[in-house]
Amino acid sequence: MDNLDRISRLISQSVAPTFAAYIPLQLARKQEILTPPPTSHQYGPDPRQELDVFLPEGEGKKPVLVALYGGGFVGGAKQLEGTDGTLHGNVGRYFADRGFVTVLPDYRLYTAENGIRYPSGAEDLSLALQWLATPGNVPQADLSKVYLLGNSAGGVHVGTFLYAEPTTFKPASAIPGLTIRGATLLGAPLHYLKGEDLPKSVLEAYFGGADALRNTSVYELRKRSDDQTPVLVAWSELDPEEEILAPTRDFLALWKDSSKPLPGNPPSPSELELKGHNHISTIPALGLGGKEDKWGEDVVAWMKERL
């Protein structure tokens, strides 16, 4: 972490050097991360619609965290290639060790040929939650205490699930027995008004054009939604300014403009800056201990305050 400020803040230029710093450290923890191993389950008909479940120790029902990784809408996996399951298995193990049934879904990714388009991430999250809520699938899960976490593009999918008009997916309120207690948006691009590092051609293709890209950002969706879910908005100290930091400030400012109150007067978000981290380091650093884990401790504390 101490050398992350020497790496470019641009997301496209920070992935390789940041992974090079952290993946060997997680590979050395492979046995710890994958013991006991997670169980894998299909939650929908597409091959990408598979999820891993990490169970905490102890008897009785446990709260649930459903965590969606990032990848720019075109990449990512719950078991990322080249990491032997340690990424994102480290996320599953970290939160399971802290008492949460932790669910890591894969979700469908955009390509120019496959027809996967917005709001596919929210649709897949909804299907994963419906699978979770099916009696007998995860007996240890306390469905009245479910939390969401979305990193980067995963945060966009979580925000879309919370705030978009659910015309193509079932919202949490329509899933019997399920209650979302809170959601963490971690380093999510909450709008796309600035910045050139995120490929606009891919974004416009996935969202359905320039107007749709603007109007279906989490920032714009929040303006039109009366959703009351408590939200923790988190960003890294070394996140890129135009792609992440500026949109985050704009999103948080929505609650501060008394001339334009949000529908339903939702609770103001909690805020968390991840000191020393860049956009990529937060996830591969999790579980390494010390200041690398500070953000995880803070998220766990925030969730437990809402049990």
Image (tube, grey):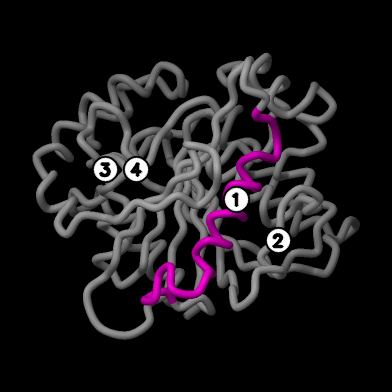
Mark 3 or mark 2, earlier in chain: 2
Helix, strand or loop at label 2? It is loop
Q: Is residue 84 above or below residue 227?
A: above
Per the rendering, the mark at residue 283 is 4
**Quadrant housing residue 255:** bottom right
Q: Give the total number of marks visible in the rendering.
A: 4
**Quadrant housing residue 189:** top right
Q: Position of residue 241 (x, y in %)?
A: 56, 30
Q: Residues within 10 Å of mark 1 (few under 14, many from 20)?
A: many
Mark 2 or mark 4, earlier in chain: 2
Q: Residues within 10 Å of mark 4 (few under 14, many from 20)?
A: many
Label 3, label 2: how many angstroms apart (C-alpha)? 32 Å
Q: Which residues are magenta?
A: 116-141
Label 2, label 1: how many angstroms apart (C-alpha)? 11 Å
Q: Residue 144 vs residue 264: left or right?
A: left
Name the residue beneath numbered marker 2: 171
Query: CB under 8 Å between callouts 3 and 4?
Result: yes
Q: Amino acid at mark 1?
A: Val
Name the residue beneath numbered marker 1: 158
Q: Amino acid at mark 4?
A: Ile
Q: Position of residue 68 (x, y in %)?
A: 48, 47
Per the rendering, the mark at residue 285 is 3
